[in-house]
Image: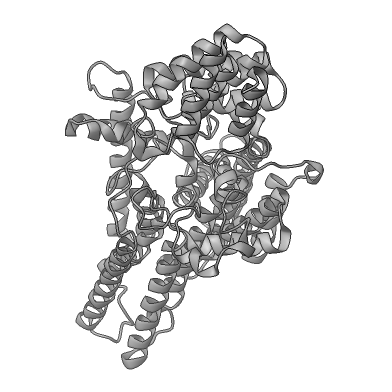
Amino acid sequence: MHPRLAAAVTVVFTFLCYKPPGRHSWTREWVYDDSVAVSGNPLVSTWNETELSQVWERDFWGRLELRSSKSHKSYRPLCTLLLRFEWMLRGDDPNGFHTTNVVLHALVSMLCIPLSLEFLRAAEAPLTADHWFLAAATGLFFASHPIHTEAVSNVTGRAEIMMTLFYLMGLFSFLLLDPTRRACTGFYSLVFDALRCGVVLLCCLAAVLCKETGVTLPFLCATWQAVRCMHGFWGPKRQSPLVGLRRSVAVCLVLVCGMVAVALLRSSWNEGPAPDFFHNANRASRIPARLSRSLALTWLWVEHGWALVYPVKLCVDWGADTIPILVSCTADARCLFLAGAILVLLGVGAVLLHRIVRGLSGSVLLVLGLGFPILTFVPSGNVLVHVGATKAERWLYLPSYGFCFLLACVLAGLADSLARLVFMPRTTPDPDSRVVDGGGGCSSPRKTRRAAGWIRWTLTSIILVLYHQRTASRDREWGNNLLLWRSAERVAPRNAQVLKNLGGRYFAKGATSTAIAVLTRGWELSEVDRGVHDPSLLLTVSLLTAKRYDQARTVAKEGIDRVSRLPTNFGDWKSEQAKLHATLALLATSRDEAQKQLQEAQSLDVHMDAQLHELVTSARTRFRL
């Protein structure tokens, strides 16, 4: 498939996955983090009341200064600027924001095609139909992979898409401006090297301003430069190897030093202590023993890798006990799977290293198929810093490019093997002759290549159909809060946050009895976990609505005790305590008891929100206070 046709097909297929016919009539909602990062972000939704300069001073959520000790240090100013500008044009329109995400995802998917071709051209020029297949399949797989739904369907995931766009643009520019591609020598070679290093560092800075994962871009470019240097691809043949070696070393040093400078610059903007996440968000990183912690975190890498291979079990929240911690090498059967995964990875790496000795084509597989996913996942893999989640599908948006390229290579190799097995004769024929094999069929190298092409596209089409079905279904779930949390409950039935959010959605829809059943399960789990997602207030209000006053009184009293023990560095819980006291005032059996509870509520939260004001007013009206 020609690259231009492949790019057009990729765009169409992207919209078929995320904007299929008829879905334009569906009304999307602000889901998950969107209610905080977009519709609830004062830098976005109230753009006319905030200064533009505050975008560069506050964190991604728009409420706290980046240097604040309570900030999570998520800094995405370029993404916030785009969201702010789009809100100015669209207003409160989740469908429109989702469309922008799909367009950006289509651009990234298209960029995967020329980028793959540039890597293949650098290794095996000139390009052939086999290389075009690898590039086209990579773009199509990236466009439709179900693991991308969290980044594309969730508007907050735009940070991942924009970061990936700048990241791949920088990598593509580094390959495109390679002086060996134009046979430049002397001064012009130095100019092109300086130019491509500058472009890479600018794209790295832009990517970091969208998400911190982009800081690895210069190191990846330096890795590719070093691999090319290993094969003697450091310059035109008329130059001495020593000159090319010196230039390659200089390029690598500039890129690595630039990466360190960008990382230090980004760290200097925090101006405060590192964010401290609650233990339920990422329990594996809280294990005190180093060996046990390393074992648990390694298993999380396997979990993410398996999500790329088999993207069926997807969930919006993987906290708490959704993924049991792997702490023992003998008492857990998962250790066998972990050992097998490590052996497979080492085996594939050994094969590719062997191929490097024979040619640069093996290096492309090593750098893109293995190096790219691993290197780009390191910032999110609890290696350098501990992150605030156990597992997140959005983290795999950038690493999945390498996986999609590797998948295309595997399909191409499998198709070639099947074609040779079925169509090649038992004896080696003359290339220009047609040979009749023992089965009575005619065979030739041309027929074998044609058969391999059909097998490639047949296998690719099957995978694309499966990807499309799962992606379209998952995108539908990401468009509705109730569907999203119901799907999460099927994957994580013992996650208190999932149950709290699902119960809240049922209560908002008027299904009070179902909400009470779900919230009760979450309340019982929260008692064990001591998590910040305690549903006591929501369960109390649901019981009050159902006129189950005795149960509501019991939950409210215990809820006050639970909330009072929550760590203050993860939020101000006084407002929730005040609402529970106001609920007890409404449920009081005497006027004095109601007066006492109202005084407690007012002392905890002087600035009453709408819900607290309604509870206080109802209690005063009932007891005529």
Q: Position of residue 610 (x, y in %)?
A: 63, 37
Against 158, is 576 above or below?
above
Q: Is residue 360 visible?
A: no
Quarter-of-image position of residue 284? top left
Against 447, is 271 above or below?
below
Residue shown at 30% from the left, 76% from the top: 234
- Name the one closer to the observer, 448 or 47: 47
Q: Position of residue 238 (x, y in %)?
A: 30, 86
Q: Is residue 274 left or right of residue 452?
A: left
Q: Is residue 500 left or right of residue 526?
A: right
- Name the one closer to the observer, 285 or 518: 518
Q: Is residue 531 left or right of residue 621?
A: left
- On the rendered image, what quadrant is the C terminus found in? top right
- On the rendered image, what quadrant is the N terminus found in? bottom right
Q: Is residue 567 visible?
A: yes
Q: Position of residue 544 (x, y in %)?
A: 63, 16
Check the image and name the residue furthest to the top.
Answer: 550
- Name the one closer to the observer, 329 or 58: 58
Against 43, is 229 above or below?
below
Quarter-of-image position of residue 130? bottom right
